[in-house]
Image (cartoon, rainbow, N blue to C red):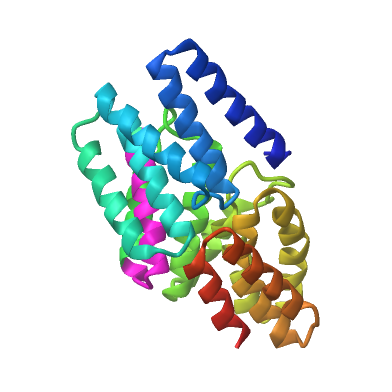
Amino acid sequence: FGDADEALRCAREAVRIAEGRGVQRHLLLSKNKLFFVLLYQGRTKSQEGILALAHARLLAHKSGDLLMRFQVESNCGVAHMDAFELDEATHCFEAAGTILRGADASVMRLNHQYNLGELAFLKGDLPAALNHFATAESLLTPSAMPGDILLLVTAAIGLCSMELGALSDARHREAMLRPLPATWHFDPTMVLTFAARLLERRARHGEALELLTPQCQRLKRHFPLAWMKLLPLSTRIARRLGRGGWQEQLREGIQLATSLGLEARATLLKDVAE
């Protein structure tokens, strides 16, 4: 995702090749990957995204592959969660969890627990979120420890601990995060939120904004959805400091969310602007 447009071009080309060869397994994989790329760009509500998901679901069901069926439903849940459609996300994750009961896949269970934790966090249920994140961490093993999920789980536990007042636990998690990556190949919203909220907690608001501003500028180009998700936090800090420019950023975020069909996300940003 150094180049979001190139990623989408490659995903579309993979679908084209798979369709030409008529191999259902390859078509399922390519359709699911296309939806995943569209998800990171916030374009799952587009006609292309809707069709990619519908086709991937159909192919996954026909294939009998439990892990692929899980991935399709899980990606759908993440898309709804990122769009701030939390009820819809809950239904998709319930479906994914049901499928997962019949599969032997520790990495998938880890990802599922992380997603459930993020959903609980967005719903404001911090104890439940922390429990899911801790369960995800317990599933980390040398054979199931991709660097991105390790970083996400660490930040998520730290964020929940901080918000619940367990500051020593939060500081421990903070030490595990340093230094932050210079570039991101996954959605860093949870990691950056934790880092910025810690600085806020210490009344170092200027440093928090200095952390978020360049990160958001890069994310706006490569991960527009992550940029929109961080806008409420960066806006709140900028307003507290009396800094300008946040109004224009919010307007751009609202316009982008609306253009992508992310109405709940647009409404959330409108509420921040008031």
The residue at 49%/39% (across/down) is 35
Q: Quadrant of the C terminus?
A: bottom right
Query: Chief secondary structure of the magenta span?
Result: helix
On the picture, is 188 further left or further right than 5? left
Q: Which of the 4 quarters of the picture holds residue 119?
A: bottom left
On the picture, is 69 further left or further right than 224? left
The residue at 44%/66% (across/down) is 160
Task: Please tell me which residue lies in front, 128 or 137.
Answer: 128
Residue 270 rendering spot, x and y as whole percentages: 58, 79
Q: How many numbered marks does the figure carry?
A: 0
On the picture, is 102 further left or further right than 42? left
Task: Please tell me which residue lies in front, 147 or 26.
Answer: 26
Q: Is residue 123 magenta?
A: yes
Residue 259 rendering spot, x and y as whole percentages: 61, 62
16 versus 230 height, above or below = above
**Does residue 202 show up?**
no
Q: Is residue 143 magenta?
A: no
Task: Please tell me which residue lies in front, 269 or 142.
Answer: 269
Q: Which residues are magenta?
A: 107-127
178 versus 108 height, above or below = below
Q: Which of the 4 quarters of the picture holds residue 59?
A: top left
Residue 44 rendering spot, x and y as whole percentages: 50, 49
**Does residue 43 show up?**
yes
161 versus 157 height, above or below = below
Task: Please tell me which residue lies in front, 259 or 88.
Answer: 259
Q: Quadrant of the N terminus?
A: top right
From this viewpoint, which residue is outermost toward the right? 244
The residue at 79%/78% (across/down) is 245
